[in-house]
Amino acid sequence: MKFHLNLIKAVNESIYQIFAENRYADKVLERVLRSNKLWGARDRAFIAENTYDMVRYWRLIKAVSELEKHDLNETNLYTLFGTWQLLKGLEIPNWEEFKNVDTKKIERNYKVLKTQRKIIYSYPDWMDDLLYKELGKQWNIEAEALNLQAQVIIRTNTLKITKQDLATALKEKKIETEPVKGCKDGLFLKERQNLFSLPEFQEGMFEVQDASSQLVAEFLLPEPGMRVIDACAGAGGKSLHIAAILQNKGRLLSLDTEQWKLDETKKRARRAGVSNLETRLIEGPKTIKKLFGTADRLLLDVPCSGLGVLKRNPDAKWKLSQIFIEHIKEKQQEILTEYCNIVKVGGKLVYATCSILPSENQEQVNNFLSKNANFTLEEEKVVLPSESGFDGFYMARMVRTN
């Protein structure tokens, strides 16, 4: 493989901003990739893939290079980059920048450390301990699966086009796709590429959305003509999918505590041709109480640890804390308890997270049901990255009986 110094510098700059300046990886890469218009698709792929992979395996890279406690200066950044290339089985050029990369030391340290799950797959001690405590031996499998590169999956907007017609339109632009098994409207790209400049995207024919996320709207079982409330809508990805399933018939209300997210939802809804969606800011308990008993379907895609989507957000490994997770679990139960009465008698509520922790998932639902006898569990689904290849997700559908 031929290395180019300017591309390695871009990777090093990204790594510095992510770890030394504590910035989010996706935002860092967005800025870095915009900084040089002369970079082609391969150059951009090299920068993005190496940056994300180094973030994924950060603990391993630092451990085998023995740079755990060293500053991220220019020399050490090149050493860490070179270390990662050797771990991938590649040869590095005989450049001055790589003078401190000690191949024998790296090989020796790797042999010693490769039996330690938290180092070989690169997780903080507390996170590895927590996930093993909750998942047992299954964590050995998930730890590896969450380090794989996420597939690019799109959701067909059936308000505007069929899945087959979308696949055909993309193929005409030399973009090969395949249907996603078990996901009605999903297509995955055989090769990664930028889709946002395509007229098909700009005209609202599809959204980029992981298969697990797409499964949630289907699991809610919305039907045309129903009144559906997405009470933790965020930027509206699942709301848009629900609108398509409703065929623009009935009413869809998207709620969130942040107005900028709702503004993004409205913008995306216009592009998607959604006409039955209303957004509303949650200003306090009164906003929720006014909606009691009004929904045929209620989606609670609650804030969570995000431990199921580490493929897409690998820097979350290093930014999350156990204190945050304990706090978010309290918030989840609070939302379930306060919002459940939005559902009509006979209506259905779906609780969903993008976490693989049972304490955020099954345990939360069981706790809720033990205190709310007027709800019964109809079905639950666990999506594990190792089994599906998708993001980790959990969803439980409950029926209000009285």
Image: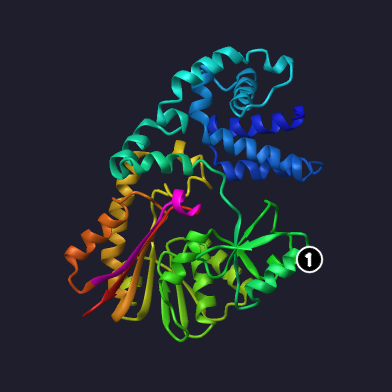
* Label 1 secondary element: loop
The N terminus is located in which quarter? top right
Name the residue that disc number 1 marks. Answer: 172
Q: How is the image coloured?
A: rainbow
Q: In the shown orientation, is residue 318 left or right of residue 395?
A: right
On the image, which quarter does residue 349 sit in?
bottom left
- Residue 388 within the magenta-colored segment of the rendering: yes
Magenta range? 376-389
Q: Is residue 35 magenta?
A: no
| Residue 401 place in picture, x, y as percent | 23, 79
Q: Residue at x 42, y 43 (%)?
A: 142
Residue 143 against residue 67 in the figure, above or below: below
Q: Is residue 86 visible?
A: yes
Inspect the image, locate mark 1, and give the three-letter code of the amino acid beneath it.
Glu
Relative placement, left or right, of 213 versus 340 is right
Q: Residue at x 47, y 65 (%)?
A: 215
In the picture provided, is 362 more to the left or to the right than 144? left
In-image side of 273 versus 222 (left or right): right
* Along the viewing direction, whichever of 328 and 187 lies nearer the viewer: 187
Tell me residue 72's x, y (percent): 57, 23
Kindly tell me whether residue 320 is visible in this rendering.
no
When the figure is inspected, residue 111 is found, relative to residue 367, above or below; the finding is above
